[in-house]
Amino acid sequence: MTNLETETWFPPLSSAKGKPRLFQGLDKLALQDILSHSVVKEYEGGKMLVQQGDDVWCVFILLKGHLRTFRTGKEGDEVTLRMLDQGESCMAATVFMGGNSPFAVEVTTKSRILEVPASFVKNFALKDSQFSVNMLKTLATHYESAIDQVDNISIKTPFQRIGHYLLQKHIEQGSNSMSFELSFKKATIASHLGMTPETFSRALKKIQKMGITVEGNKIKMRDAFALCHFCDLEIAKNCSLVDTENCPHCHF
């Protein structure tokens, strides 16, 4: 990849929110090294990047669009493991685990993806300490998300799971806003939360009684604190309003 090609896509992602997490804090030479060994590709929604059981050949870094990872059981039933937004990556842990991929990766909307060869990722992690730290932070985030998902499915009711998820999305998109968009289809979110689409719909109707309006994938709230009832320690640490005079419920 030439420097010119690098300049066309990297500057728009230079913000803390949009810049790929694996690239945080890397110097220009390190970035050029990564990009010179990688390729940027665009895919339409519905494209399968990896099938469950495939060889692990690269790390996918999402520059634009959305991905999901999922597992399929013997009876054909699916469970969505992760739903990826811009700047996130997948397959990093699997690269270091060895063996075949334990899950599938699907493009859910038109997406732009940086594909970094697995062999390069392993070697680069050994010589660049910042990249290694970024990798560890990414894996720690995935571990935390997995614990959160188990907690949701094992302890929380469907109503609580949806409220928890919606509050996370609200904070990610701006905790002072009165509305936000769901990036994935409701059936995918339901699978991720461990429930059927029918159960998801029933719980969503219950949440609307709290002053939440659902119009397609757009969520509107009567006030910016309508979902605060579902707050917990994990969510609170990412909320800009926690422990302020404007925080009605989350004084941890």
Image (cartoon, rainbow, N blue to C red):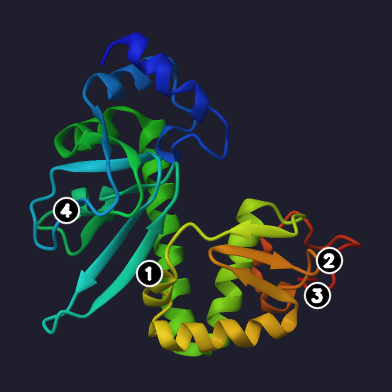
Q: Mark 2 and mark 1 in contact (Cβ < 8 Å)?
A: no
Mark 4, residues whose alpha carbon is within 10 Å: few (<14), some, or many (≥20)?
A: some
Dot label at residue 188: 1
Tell me which amino acid carries mark 2: Cys
Q: CA distance from mark 4 to mark 3?
A: 42 Å
Q: Describe residue 175's horizontal placement relative to residue 118 as left or right.
A: right
How far across and how far down the image is residue 34, in percent? 29, 25
The label nearer to you, 1 versus 3, is 1
Q: Does residue 139 lie above or below 73 as drawn?
A: above
N-term mark: 4 or 3: 4
Q: Nearer the viewer, residue 203 or 148?
A: 203
In the picture, the quarter occupied by the C terminus is: bottom right
Neighbour tally class for label 1: few under 14, some 14-19, many 20 plus, Cα within 10 Å: many
For the residue marked with disc 3, what is the amino acid? Answer: His
Instruction: Name the amino acid, label 1.
Output: Thr
Residue 218 located left or right of residue 25: right
Query: Is label 1 in contact with label 3 (beta carbons under 8 Å)?
Result: no
